[in-house]
Each structure stands twice: as C-alpha cells, then as structure tokens.
Image: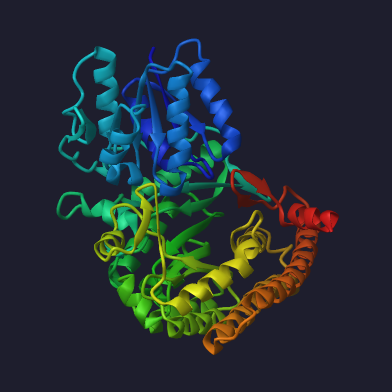
Amino acid sequence: MAWIALVGPELEENLSLRYLAASLGRAGYDSRIMAYNDDGHFGPVLEAITGAEEPPLLVGLSLAFQWRAPDFLALAVALREEGYRGHVTAGGHFATFAAADLLRDFPQLDSVCRQEAEETLVTLVRALEAGTSWAEIPGMVSRDGAEARLAPLPKVPDLADLPWPVRSGEPARCFDHGIAPLVSSRGCYANCTFCCIAAWHEQTLPGKRYRLREAGDVAAEMAAMRRERGIDIFVFHDDNFFIPNHGKSLARLNALADAVEAEGLRDFATVVKARPNDVHPAVFQVLVERLRCIRCYVGIETDADQGLVTLRRWGQSSQNHRAIDVARKLGLFVCFNLLMFDPDTTLASVRKNLDFIEYAADFPFNFGRVELYAGTPLLARMQAEGRCRGDYLQWDYALGSRDVQRFYELAMACFLPRNFGEDALANTIQGMRFDLEIVRRFHPGAHDPALYEEGRALSRRLALDSVERLRALLARVEGGGAGNETLVERLAAGARRVEDEVRAGMLHVARALEARVGRGTPLTFLGDRVATPLQRAVAVEVAS
C-alpha cells in the first residue's frame, strides 16, 4: 500500500496536516505526519523518508509560514540529493500565494496545492497511483515549460463532510490535564491589510469566506477527544471564533454550551482568540460561565488611530480599552500583541501604544513590527511605493521616518532577549499565568488568591518596566541626543536585572503550585518542547 509523508511544524497538533491525514485515511491511504519544528528535525525527517524500505508515493510540505519556507525548501533539495524520486508537493498559505515563484526557482518541487487541499490531495494521490494526469485537478499548480500552470481553485469543503482530524500521538498536559487544539469554523470575515489569512480567504468563492461547523458536531468531537485521549482543555484555533454580531455570537456560544452539556462534558476548560470588537459583556459572560474559558488572546494589534487605519482593523481605541475592562470585570485571563511598528508609524503612535500597555499592564503582552507577507494588501502597497527590499521569501522595509526607524532599531536592540530570544520572558510568563488559571479552574482547593495575585504582579512589573524603558528610548530619540548606544546598554542591563527578579518570582510561584497541587507537572509551551516555569527558572538560577 502506497503511503504519504506529511511534513510540517507540530508545535502543538498541526490541524492542517491532521485534517489532510484524515481525508487521506478515509480514502484508504496511509499517511504519516512528520514534525519539522527546527534544525534538529531535519536529519530524522530526511532519513525517515529516504531510508524507508518503501519510499512514500508523495511528500507533502507545509509552507504555511513564510519565514520557515527556506527550511522546507532545503529539505526538498536534500530529498532529491538523497535519491528520492517520488512526487513532492507543497501547500499552505505561503505556497498558495508564491506558487509560481516556488516552481520557477525550485525544480525539486513537482507541484503546489492551493487553498484548502483535502480533496485536492486525495485526488492527486489517486492520479499518481494510477499514473494518470493530475495537472487539471482543481487546486493544482504545475509547470508548463517555464511558466506555472494554475488549475481552477477547488470548491471550499463543506465542513460537515470533512472527517475529524487525526489525533495521533500523546497530547500535551498541564497538571495531568490533556490539552489539544480544534476548530469550530474556517475562514475570516475581516480584511486586515497585513494578514495573509484574510488574503487567503479572499480567494474563495463568494459568500464562503467564513463557515461554521454545527455546534453538535463540535461538541461531539470534544467528547471524543475527552473519551479517547483524556483532553480537558480545548484550545480553539479559529481565526474567528466569534460572529461579527453580538446577538448571533451569543446564540452560537449558548448553542455550543448546550451541545457540550448534552454530550455529558462538565469539568473542562477552553482557550479562544478574539478581536477587540468581539469582547462584549453578555457574550463573554457566557464564554466564561458556560464554556469555561480560562484564557483569551485578544488581537489588539494597535491602539493608535494611525495604526488602526493602516492595518484596517475595523475598530477604535475605545474597543481595545473596553475589551480589557470586560476581561477584568469577569476575571478572565487575556494576553495580547501589539504591532507597534508599521510602515506609517509615527512617534505619536508609539506614545499611544505605550499608554495602552500601561493601561493593560496586568496582562502579558509582546510587541513587534508588522511584516510583509505574501498575498497581502500591505505587501502590494509597499511594492507599489518601491519600499520593499529582499524577495518573495523574505521582504524587508524601512519605517516611514528616520526617527521612527531609529527608535525601532534601539527598541529591538534593547528588548530582543526579552521579547524574541530563546526562553523570551515576555512569552514564557504567559505560561506561568496559564498554570495559575488551570489550578484555579480544576483545583479550587489548591488555589491560593495570594499566589495568584503574585503571578499577576509579576506580569504587571514586567510590563511597566518595558514601558519605562521604551519611554526612555523615545525621549532620547525625540530629543535628538547622542550616545544612544550607551543608553541602550544601560537600559538593557537594567532590563536584565528586572528579568532575573521576575524569573525568581516565577520560580517561587512554580514551586508553590507544584507543592499545592501535588500531581502532574505544570507545562507551558516553548517550541516543540514543554518546560515548567520551575525548570526554566532553575536553569537561569544555575546559570547565574
């Protein structure tokens, strides 16, 4: 029996690959999901494919993330160098938009599958097995001489007809509670200029950009995940978990809660994502009380009026503040991200976003620059303005003014370890907060309000320290003073001292949690590894 290798990032459970595997399985084909999360997986994946007694009929590469594309293309090159002669295809957001470029520059690829590829991939495998033509299969991109040949786009799948994703392997756990992702919808109703997800769904048939699964089907999948794998924490990866109408969202959440209760699920928790305009008191009360949400990522992105226009966020600063206020009133743990730097950012925009960080300092956050992704309106605009550097694999650009560019460079120099380095504290502190929420939700007898507040205080201290240091950098840039490198060194040294103190606080919280709960291990995600705040804090303690 022919088998298929599906290669992609598995930082959690890659639902894209697992839906593909489920469709292949229903069609009678064996597929094997191979995690390629970092350089350490390159050799094992290569060996599993080229060293197999019977090589796979097809290797599918997940090119969802533009920044990881060189890694997967290097794997395609290595497969050919090691003698693999089967079909190599690529799919995902980036591959869909860059299909012509990829086939032009990488002869190691035979094809690209565009858009949602469950039916496309099954039909391709059948054609390869039968030795028949596959170039006209809907969704396929092939070569026609030196040009790319694009077959028509496939019809978007009816979500009710798709098999549930394959749930192989051991799930992640926190205090022995299984954690796994799922989706209750596909698509995005928004049209943000910077987002490749919105651009991806823009290509679909009219009226099909956003589709919902039946609440009963979602609840049945949750019950099966609990029954078969011991999942207690359900992480919804929907691009839009909420409907852009508060009344309809309320009805949808109540219907899902009713269906979950009908399945007999009682002791569980959910994690969701939301746009600021989704955060409505009545809707979120149901989310917290009936769907037992313990964490919500809120896509703030920017609080500056200029940024909201540039990014086409469909919102106002007041909605961002209301989202934080509603979360506080309901006692809901939220986290957020700020795209503080975009092509039009001004120093006034920066000040506005720093004010928002201070306003929401009790919640973990990170900040960075808007990147230029394939297929997006923002990339098209920047290309038209002649402001792009690089190529389709990685575009770069300068910010709109010299002062803003200088501030961005100083901020990145000062905050690179905190925000983006290995074990970046701005990210890992979210894990400690998540551990606290899990204890509060599942182990009320072990929940200590004082310890919980200590964790919140650590978040607040880190956030306010970031604001203070960023404002110092901003004042130097606005004042036109010299010696910025010296200032960065001084601020970075002070930041490290605060980070060491925060990590020590995390160590205390982690030890106290483990002592109070006395079962399992509190786990938080970092790449393809799981590590406790205790383990991370101890590592810092030992290193120092």
Residue sitting farthest toward the bottom = 479
Q: Toward which corner of the image does residue 458 lie, by quadrant?
A: bottom right
In this view, 290 is above or below 536: below
Q: Toward which corner of the image does residue 426 lie, by quadrant?
A: bottom right
* Residue 71, image x, y percentages: 48, 38
Q: Residue at x 36, y 55 (%)?
A: 373
Q: Is residue 176 visible?
A: no
Observer-nearest of 371 and 323: 371
Observer-nearest of 248 and 211: 211
* Residue 14, image x, y percentages: 46, 41
Q: Is residue 56 left or right of residue 471?
A: left
In this view, 272 is above or below 7: below
Observer-nearest of 489 and 58: 489
Q: Is residue 169 visible?
A: yes
Residue sitting farthest toward the top = 53
Observer-nearest of 398 and 238: 398
